[in-house]
């Protein structure tokens, strides 16, 4: 079992970052295995925070030139923490406008 899965198993957690994984890659690269990651995360009880509030699809967290609008950055939590989430959005301004990074952060709101 990978270390991040082992550390999160059976406890409350919030884990996020640049996972370099996007669901859209599976559509353009039929042999890609990214969907497997999301299937495993869901089977392990991980809740994908952004999709909880935006079930219609991926957002854009990666801003590099004319590349496709992939969401490479994701936040996950356990179901008990998910009930305290009140929002999860992508803050594109630092990447899209200011060019501080080619990745945009996710903003999570909690009612703790």
Image: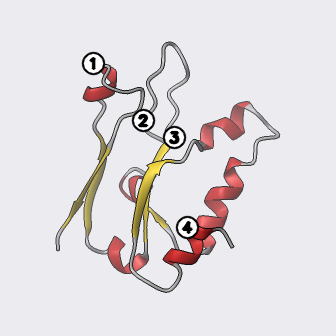
Query: Mark 3 or mark 4: which comes first in sequence?
Result: 4
**Residue 111 at x, y = what percent?**
17, 70
Disc 1 secondary structure class = loop
Mark 2 in CB contact with mark 3 (< 8 angstroms):
yes
**Mark 3 or 4, which is nearer the eye?**
4
Residue lying furthest top: 66
Quadrant for residue 52, please give it. Answer: bottom left
Instruction: Kindly report the distance in space between the C-alpha atoms of the residues bearing marks 2 and 4.
Output: 22 Å
Mark 2 in CB contact with mark 4 (< 8 angstroms):
no
Residue at mark 4: 4
**Mark 2 or 4, which is nearer the eye?**
4
Instruction: Kindly report the distance in space between the C-alpha atoms of the residues bearing marks 3 and 1.
Output: 18 Å
Disc 4 secondary structure class = helix
Question: How would you rate the neighbour count of disc 4 (Cα within 10 Å): few for under 14, some for 14-19, many for 20 or more?
Answer: few
The mark found on residue 61 in the picture is: 2
Q: Can residue 42 be seen in this view?
A: no
Query: Mark 3 or mark 1: which comes first in sequence?
Result: 3
- Going 66% across and 36% down the picture, which residue do you hit? 25
- Going 25% across and 27% down the picture, which residue do you hit? 93
**Residue 17 at x, y = what percent?**
44, 50
Q: Is residue 64 visible?
A: yes
Residue at mark 1: 97
Question: Dividing the image into 4 quarters, which one contains the N terminus?
Answer: bottom right
- Going 61% across and 37% down the picture, which residue do you hit? 24
**Residue 15 at x, y = what percent?**
42, 62
Mark 3 in CB contact with mark 4 (< 8 angstroms):
no
Residue at mark 3: 72
Question: How would you rate the neighbour count of disc 3 (Cα within 10 Å): few for under 14, some for 14-19, many for 20 or more?
Answer: many
Query: Mark 2 or mark 3: which comes first in sequence?
Result: 2
């Amino acid at each position: 079992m990978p270390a991040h899965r082992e550390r999160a198993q059976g406890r409350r957690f919030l884990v996020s970052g640049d996972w370099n994984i996007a669901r859209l890659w599976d559509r353009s690269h039929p042999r890609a295995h990214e969907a497997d990651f999301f299937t495993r995360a869901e089977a392990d009880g991980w809740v994908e925070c952004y999709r909880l509030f935006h079930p219609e699809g991926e957002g854009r967290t990666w801003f590099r030139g004319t590349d496709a609008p992939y969401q490479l950055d994701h936040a996950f939590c356990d179901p008990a923490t998910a009930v305290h989430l009140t929002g999860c959005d992508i803050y594109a301004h630092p990447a899209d406008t200011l060019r501080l990074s080619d990745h945009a952060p996710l903003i999570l709101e909690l009612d703790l």
